[in-house]
Amino acid sequence: MKVRTAMEKATRKALAKVAEEKALLPFHGYIEGKESNLEPLIRFFPGWTLQEADGVWCAAFVYYCCKEAGFDLPIRPDECRSCHLAGCIAWEEWAIGDDRIGYHKGTDAFVPEAGDIVLYDRVFNNQEHDHIGIVLRNPGNTIIVAEGNKGNISQVVERPIDGHIRAFIRITDGYRYHQPERI
């Protein structure tokens, strides 16, 4: 994969490409007697071990893909009140708190595109914010998504555009995080 220089702008198109490549490797936790290969994903989050990440790493996969695509993101933006970006809820808090990021609740009147981030409710557990992925394509009534931690494996999956979608996040091409000004 081509390494981006500081002068090159990160784009959602690049994010979708990276996410698809990385989902198809695949990354995985401890499965079928295999050792976890999640170290590249969790290395951004100090103090988080492979054992702790096992089975709960979908947001870390999204963060890793964003970094690989050249987006400048901290592990814990000031907008995140509850946790760092290895947690799904933090992605929502960050998107709502930074007006340079598009946050689109639900599925009405928003057409997801490649490189958008999708937040889910009640996909695996009966909880809000229980999963996250990166949109690769939108053929119409479904979306093709790169996801980490679907059965503890990264995969490309097709999901319906339905009530399980909590929101879409659209990071602006060229986005670079900056600390909010303190008054």
Image (tube, rainbow, N blue to C red):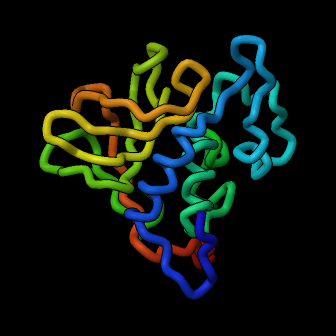
Q: Determine the residue positioned at 68% across, 56% down.
A: 75
Q: In the image shown, does 166 or 139 lie closer to the viewer?
A: 139
Q: Position of residue 101 (x, y in %)?
A: 40, 64
Reply above or below: 78 against 45.
below
Q: Determine the residue positioned at 40% across, 63% down.
A: 12
**How many numbered marks have been drawn onto this rendered protein structure?**
0
Q: Position of residue 25 (x, y in %)?
A: 59, 39
Q: Determine the residue positioned at 21% across, 40% down.
A: 107
Reply above or below: 18 against 107.
below
Q: In the image shown, does 156 or 61 lie closer to the viewer?
A: 156
Q: Quadrant of the C terminus?
A: bottom right
Residue at the outermost bottom position? 7
Q: Quadrant of the N terminus?
A: bottom right
Q: In the image shown, does 159 or 31 lie closer to the viewer?
A: 31
Q: Position of residue 42 (x, y in %)?
A: 75, 43
Reply above or below: 144 against 46.
above
Q: Determine the residue positioned at 28% across, 50% down.
A: 104
Q: Is residue 43 left or right of residue 12?
A: right
Q: Is residue 26 left or right of residue 118?
A: right
Examine the image and state in which quarter residue 128 appears: top left
Q: In the image shown, does 69 or 20 lie closer to the viewer?
A: 20
Q: Position of residue 123 (x, y in %)?
A: 41, 20
